[in-house]
Each structure stands twice: as structure tokens, then as C-alpha cells.
Image: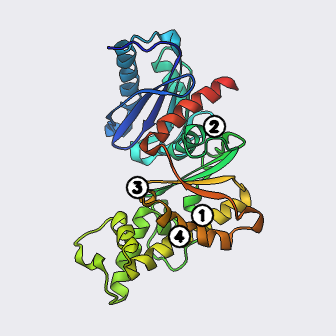
Amino acid sequence: MTKIEGKTVFGIDIGGTTVKCGIFSEDGDLLYKDEIHTRTEEKGRYILSDISRHITELRQKFQIQESDVLGIGYGVPGPVQEDGVVNGCVNLGWGKVDVADESRKLNNGIASAAGNDANVAALGEFWKGAGKGTKSMVMITVGTGLGCGVIVNGGVVFGAHGAGGELGHIPLVEGLTEPCNCGKTGCLEQAASATGIIRAAKRRLKETDMPSTLRKLPDFMAKDVVDAAREGDALANEVLDYSCGYLARGLAVAAGVVDPEIYVIGGGVSKAGDFYLDKIRRPYRELAFYASRDAKIVQAALGNDAGMYGAARLVLDSRAD
């Protein structure tokens, strides 16, 4: 097995099903990646110890001395304060957990840092992806929910309660009766997420007898709606315009607070490229404050690796403080 030379950083992206683990050089080159199962039983008590054990195995595998590990960074699917304390994480079964401190205890004092997974993914794209070279950025990940991260002057906006940049839960959407996963009704996430696209399409199919290729599918995903819209399906285009219009409204709100240089859109739906992005760009230019209208809206570049990159950068930044 090839030995990894020099100083290294571990970037850990914790998900509800798997934990993605990356070994990075000090300069941010991804040297190796793999993943392990996330054990969420017993309120997730084994997750951090499983990660620690795997890090030890990887160090042995690549002959990495403990003294050559600059730190371990974590992306966690829940609100995380700047000091690395998680304020509860439903997907993992966690209550309040000091991830950074627990990591240090489990890994012989190796420097550790933690952040919200969406914020960390944004930091990864800012560092080595679509936002590279900018000073401020907002990233939106269009998935089951609407993950968001805000970067200002090169740093993540954590917020006082670990909820900085939660654009998905801005109450923007009118006319909804079902609650969001957060318990509120009318969150941006309910219209602009992949789940929101599916829900809106099913609602529209019931409301109208418009012909649509979606009617031929016993079940469909957001990608199917996007594909149908791209092929000229009128109903699918209505649904996508609805969803993207609300996302553009959310970005316009962000513009009034952050005024970023660039918006980076990730998640599976974003793979449709300019067809999807143009449906966000057009209404954004109409809705945003005039000084912010020329901000770029681009596709994410790092895919599922963004969280690992950002976690690695997070710990490097914490060491520099």
C-alpha cells in the first residue's frame, strides 16, 4: 500500500446512512476517500467512535504518523455552533453533542472542528470548487431538503445558534397547508427542494387535466420533472417555473442580506445545467436589488465530495485562528 507522505487532514462528512471519509494534503488535494456505515442506533452513540476507529485504520493503512495529522474536520446534518457543539441532530439521534471535544478525546488530542453539513459543503465549493477565487458565496443544495451555506470574507456564517444560512426555512411560500419538516408551514424548502418539485407536480396533476408525460409514470422523481420540462412538457415546465421562481426569490432575499459574488447550486437537479439554472436566473434578476442582479448563479463543481473538502478546510481554518 502506498505511503502518504507529509502533513494530512481528515475531512469527515456524516450522513444519516453513510459517513464519507477523505484524506487531504495540507494544500487541499484529495488523496484518498472511502465511506463507512452510519450506526444511528442507541441515539447515535457509536458514530464518533466508529469514525475514530476508521481513522486509525486509515493511518495504519497509509503509514501516517499521528504527529502528521493536522486535524479532523466534521460536517454534521444539524445546527452546529462555531465551537463545534451540535444543537441536536434528528437524523443521527443526537441531542446536544460537543463533536469537536469528543473527537479530541477519541483521537489522542488531535485538533478537531465541526460544522453544519450544508455550511461545510459550501466551504468546500468555496475553497476548491465553483466558488474558488471569490470572497463571498451562497450555496444551495437542492435535495430532499434545501441545504444552504453562506460564506462571507472567506468564513462560514454560523450564526448565534448554529442556524446561520438556513435559507430553506425562510417563510416565503403561500398557500400551503402541510407542514415542513421543521414544523412550520410555508418554508422555501417546501417549494424549491427536490421533494417540493415532486409534491408540486403531483398537486398540479390533480388540479388539471393538462396532458403530461408524468401521468404515464407510476411514480416519479424531481429529475423526471426536469427531463419532461426539457422535452417541452407544458405541465412540467409550469411546475419547474413555480419551484425555481421561489428559489430565485430566496436568493433575492439573501442578496439583500449578504450580497454575495456568486450563488452555487448543487444537488441532483442541478445536473440539468443551464436549462434548470436559467429558470432561476431570469426571475432572480427581476427580484433582486439592482446592485446585486449581476451575481453569478452557477452549478456546483465538487458533487458529493464537497462536504469532505469543506470539513478539511474547516479544521485548517480553526488551526489558523
Q: Quadrant of the C terminus?
A: top right
Q: Label 4, on which residue?
A: 279
Q: Say whether marks 2 and 3 touch (CB < 8 Å).
A: no
Tag 3: amino acid: Gly
- Alpha carbon of mark 4 to alpha carbon of mark 3: how far? 16 Å
Tag 1: amino acid: Ile
Residue 170 badge: 1
Residue visible at 61% across and 72% down in the picture = 283
- Alpha carbon of mark 1 to alpha carbon of mark 3: how far? 22 Å
Identity of the residue furthest to the right in this view = 291
Tag 2: amino acid: Glu
- Alpha carbon of mark 1 to alpha carbon of mark 2: how far? 22 Å
The disc, 1 or 2, on the residue closer to the chain's N-terminal end is 2
The disc, 4 or 3, on the residue closer to the chain's N-terminal end is 3
Residue visible at 46% across and 68% down in the picture = 179
From what the image shows, is residue 8 above or below residue 168? Answer: above
x, y percent for residue 3: 39, 12
| Front tag of 4 and 2 | 4
Crowd tier of the residue under label 3, counting other residues whose Cα lies within 10 Å: few below 14, some 14–19, many 20 or above: some
